[in-house]
Amino acid sequence: MSGWINCEEQLPPENEIVRTRIADDRGIRNEAELKRQGRLWWFSDGSMYVYYTPTHWRSLEGDYGTD
C-alpha cells in the first residue's frame, strides 16, 4: 500500500481533503475523498459524514494511482 498512511499512526490535518480507504483482513473497500473534522469524516463538499472510520489515507497531491 505505497503512499498510504495508517490512521492509527497519524491522522490527516483537519478540513484537508484526502483520499481514504478501509484496508483490513476483509480487503480494500470504501475508497473516497473525505475530510476529517474531529472524529467525523465528511464528504469533500461537507454535505454529510460517513458512517465508518477509514483505516488509511493519503494526500491528493501527487496521487499514486489505484494500488
Image (cartoon, rainbow, N blue to C red):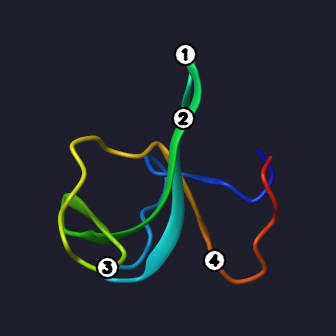
Q: From this view, report whether residue 12 is shown above or below residue 8.
A: below
Do the residues under discs 2 and 3 have CB atoms within 8 angstroms? Answer: no
Which sits in the foreground, 22 or 13? 22
Helix, strand or loop under label 4: loop
Identify the residue shown where x is 31% and y is 79%: 14
Query: What's the residue type where badge 2 is placed?
Result: Arg
Identify residue type, mark 1: Arg
**Residue plotted at (61% across, 74% down):** 59
Indicate which disc, 3 or 4, sits on the residue closer to the N terminus: 3
* Label 2 element class: strand
- Residue at 69% x, 83% y: name it: 61
Q: Which mark is residue 26?
A: 1
Identify whether 31 is placed above or below 49: above
What residue does disc 4 label? Answer: 60
Task: Give whichever of 9, 16 is nearer the camera.
Answer: 16
Q: What amino acid type should be assigned to the residue bearing mark 4?
A: Leu
Estimate the x, y position of residue 29 in percent, counting from the top left.
Answer: 54, 35
Q: Mark 1 near mark 2, Cβ–Cβ under 8 Å?
A: yes
**Residue 23, above or below 25:** below
The residue that disc 2 covers is: 29
C-alpha separation, residue under disc 1 versus residue under disc 4: 25 Å
